């Protein structure tokens, strides 16, 4: 063979070998891309499953906790009733102690009036122990009623305020979640628009 023919044959062999290598590279590259895409999709699916499981578990925990709290309502109601009974008993004790102290004051005052009743200036005659006792009785009754009403009203008022605060918190969290969702959707749409422009 001449040098020219050998050169053509070598070039043909190189060209055929290069084509085989390119074809093999393309097949290997396609297989790699398919495996990479499949692995990427599997990873995304696993992550989404993990996120969903976490959120579902959290929701189940919240439901379990609120169900337990609902079952505890009778116990809480009993505790509130006990606190109210204790408050009423304390108010009753305050009134009793005050009345006992006033009895002693009036008794002492009565003895002063008795000792000075013969006095000609008549100052002690102006103070009638019966009238003083009646005034103290009215004052103690009013004070006791005030304490009872305040106790019951403050409990009801605090429960209303607390419930209103919870409702406002719920509404604020809904608004915050909606804002976050809208922000994410807006960012997603903006990214999709940018990708279309880049293409």
Image (cartoon, rainbow, N blue to C red):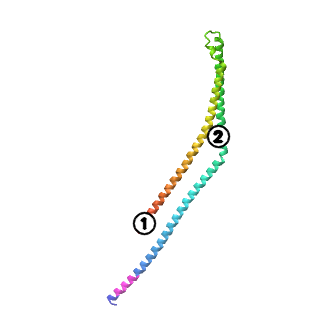
Q: Nearer the viewer, residue 77 or 26?
A: 77
Q: Is the residue 53 above or below the residue 70 in the image?
A: below
Give, as a single range, the part of the protein colored magenta.
Answer: 6-16
Q: Nearer the viewer, residue 17 or 19?
A: 19
Q: From the top left corner, tell me how far across and down residue 127 is, in percent.
A: 63, 17
Disc 1 is placed on an element classified as: helix
Report the side of 151 relative to 28 (left or right): right
Picture quarter containing residue 51? bottom right
* Residue at x-position 49% and y-position 55%: 179
Q: Is the residue 150 above or below the residue 165 in the image?
A: above
Residue 138 within the magenta-colored segment of the rendering: no
Q: How many marks are shown on the rendered structure?
A: 2
Q: Residues within 10 Å of mark 2 (few under 14, many from 20)?
A: few
Look at the magenta stretch and give its main secondary structure: helix
Q: Is the residue 55 above or below the residue 97 in the image?
A: below
* Residue topped by disc 1: 195
Q: Residues within 10 Å of mark 1 (few under 14, many from 20)?
A: few
Quadrant, the N terminus: bottom left
* Residue topped by disc 2: 80
């Amino acid at each position: 063979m001449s040098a020219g023919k050998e050169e053509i044959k070598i070039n043909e062999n190189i060209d055929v070998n290069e084509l085989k290598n390119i074809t093999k590279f393309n097949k290997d590259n396609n297989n790699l891309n398919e495996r990479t895409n499949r692995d990427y999709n599997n990873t995304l699916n696993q992550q989404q499953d993990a996120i969903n499981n976490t959120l579902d578990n959290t929701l189940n925990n919240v439901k379990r906790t609120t169900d337990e709290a609902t079952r505890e309502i009778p116990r809480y109601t009993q505790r509130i009733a006990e606190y109210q009974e204790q408050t009423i008993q304390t108010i009753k004790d305050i009134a009793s102690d005050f009345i006992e102290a006033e009895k002693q004051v009036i008794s002492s005052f009565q003895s002063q009036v008795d000792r000075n009743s013969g006095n000609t200036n008549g100052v002690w005659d102006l103070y009638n122990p019966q009238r003083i006792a009646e005034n103290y009785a009215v004052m103690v009754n009013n004070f006791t009623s005030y304490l009872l009403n305040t106790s019951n009203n403050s409990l009801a008022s605090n429960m209303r305020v607390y419930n209103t605060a919870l409702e406002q918190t719920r509404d604020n969290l809904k608004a915050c979640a909606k804002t976050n969702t809208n922000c994410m959707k807006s960012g997603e749409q903006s990214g999709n628009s940018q990708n279309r422009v880049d293409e």
